[in-house]
Amino acid sequence: MNGSYGKNVVTQKQGKVKEMLLRQIRYFLAIAETGSFSEAAARCFISQSSVSQQIKALEDELGVTLLERTPRRVILTDAGRYLYENGRQLVAAAEKLKIGVQAAANKGSERLVICWINGSVPDFLENALCAFKNRFPDLLVDVYGTGYYEAFYDLETGRTDIVLAGRSAPRESGYESFLITKSDYYAWVCPALEISKREFVTAADLKDLACIIVSNDKERDTEQRYLRELTGIDNYSLFAASCEEAALMAAAGSGFYLTDNQNLPAGLKKVPFYAGGRPLSKSYYLYTDNFGKYVRAFIDTLIDLGFAPQSAEQAM
């Protein structure tokens, strides 16, 4: 065998092993963050059996048990906690390196990337973007919506500069966070339903109606659990791909859509939602780990529009 050929084969095999290890660590991180093999599989776009096989291979490779499987939830062992804390940094560093190399190839094309969580586009975002673009007409501004875990993964790996979210970040995130505003929840319902005539509604009032949730396919369980913990609503759920689709489903009388969105489509009725005897509100936060000049300028734009961003510590 030619010596250089043999070295190339070994190098290629080593590269594939490293790539596989990174992929296995990504699967492990997904399980650690969701507490479920099925949710992790959906999040990673692979089958549950494939996730199980890859985690077993990872445990065999490391010679340790990373996860304890219980009937209700997956629990991290001490070794698992160590891998979670350090594996996130490893995967994030690999992604940042990739993005940095790509950015170097496109040097000179400055941009600001802003992401929000699907189903909760902040009402202030349009005005903020217009005002910001007036200040920086030549700057490329990218905006997109995605799932909850995907958004913070994109922030951690440098794919986005800002995440706008109506809930707290995943555990141990360490991002800088600012409370931007609060907005009350409403149940959007068809006027033909008796519930539409009430002054306000509670979870108990809505128990016989389907709950319409905006979510992508892989984060349905996550969104359902979040809503249950926030509101006490544990109804049968219907899922929509967008706010517009959810509104149409509510207009058809399929159920109710719980949202803080104030832009009520014509024909629908919005009824204030109460929890604990008072209106339930959503707190919108800006998350970032990049205090570049454009992130700072975007925060300044929010201030100019009358918002008073507070750090998480100040807001408590």
Image (tube, helix red, strand yellow):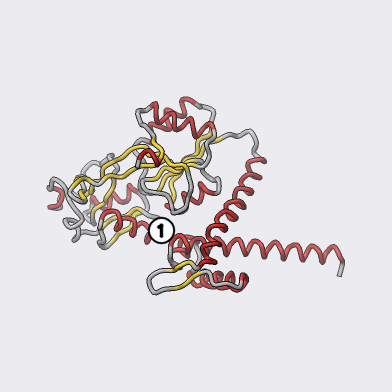
Residue 105 image-quadrant placement:
top right
Count of number-bearing discs: 1
Label 1: state its secondary structure: helix
Q: Position of residue 236 (x, y in %)?
A: 26, 63
Give percent across and percent down for residue 143.
46, 40
Image-quadrant location for residue 35: bottom left
Q: Is residue 224 left or right of residue 100?
A: left
Q: At 46% across and 32% down in the image, what residue appears?
A: 298
At horizontal 53% and vertical 69% (from top left) the residue drawn is: 66
> Quarter of the image containing the C terminus?
top left
State left or right for residue 251 relative to residue 165. Answer: left
Which of 64 and 108 lies nearest the eye of the viewer?
Answer: 64
- Residue topped by disc 1: 219
- Residue sticking out furthest to the right: 2
At 37% from the left and 53% from the top, the residue drawn is 241
The amino acid at mark 1 is Glu
Residue 72 in the image: above or below residue 134 = below
The quadrant the N terminus occupies is bottom right
Q: Residues within 10 Å of mark 1 (few under 14, many from 20)?
A: many
Image coordinates for residue 52, horizontal then vertical, percent: 51, 72
Q: Nearer the viewer, residue 184 or 174?
A: 174
Percent across and percent down for residue 262 are 27, 40
- What's the residue at 77%, 66% (across, down)? 10
User: Does 38 sit above or below residue 128?
Assistant: below
